[in-house]
């Protein structure tokens, strides 16, 4: 279980389980894109860090957008 954590939950694992693909990035940034909906989100920081509140909000919105587009 690797990733940026929020209360013990790996946000990267959540993105990948929802169908987001890591498209690479520069430095400590990773760009995830959902292939069906086209929704994208950039995940900054080292994998061992705790998530900042703005990142949790961005990932939550991206997951909701991807879910709504798949309906």
Image: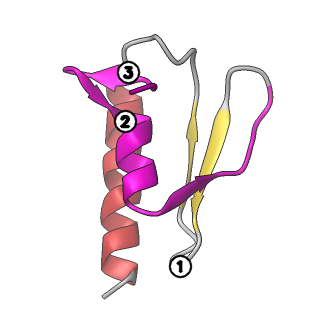
Q: Residue at x 38, y 27 (%)?
A: 1
Q: Which quadrant is the C terminus positioned in?
A: bottom left
Q: Within the magenta stretch, is there residue 51?
A: no
Residue 46 in percent (x, y) is at 57, 14
Number of numbered markers:
3
Residues at marks 1 and 3, CA–CA distance in whole angstroms: 26 Å
Which label's residue is closer to the chain start, 1 or 2?
2
Front of the two marks 1 and 3: 1
Spatial separation of the CA atoms under disc 2 and disc 3: 8 Å
- Does dot 2 land on a helix, a strand or a loop? helix
Residue 13 forms part of the magenta stretch:
yes
N-terminal-most mark, 1 or 3: 1
Q: Please tell me which residue is depicted at 67% across the width and 29% down the height of the picture.
A: 29
What residue is disc 1 on? 36
Query: Is residue 24 placed above or below 20 in the rendered structure?
Result: above
Residue 51, which numbered label? Answer: 3
* Image height of 25 relative to 63, above or below: above
């Amino acid at each position: 279980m690797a990733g940026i954590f929020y209360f013990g939950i790996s946000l990267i694992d959540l993105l990948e389980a929802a169908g987001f693909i890591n498209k690479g990035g520069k430095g400590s940034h990773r760009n995830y894109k959902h292939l069906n909906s086209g929704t994208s989100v950039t995940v900054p920081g080292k994998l061992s860090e705790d998530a900042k509140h703005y990142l949790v909000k961005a990932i939550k919105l991206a997951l909701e957008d991807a879910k709504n587009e798949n309906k």
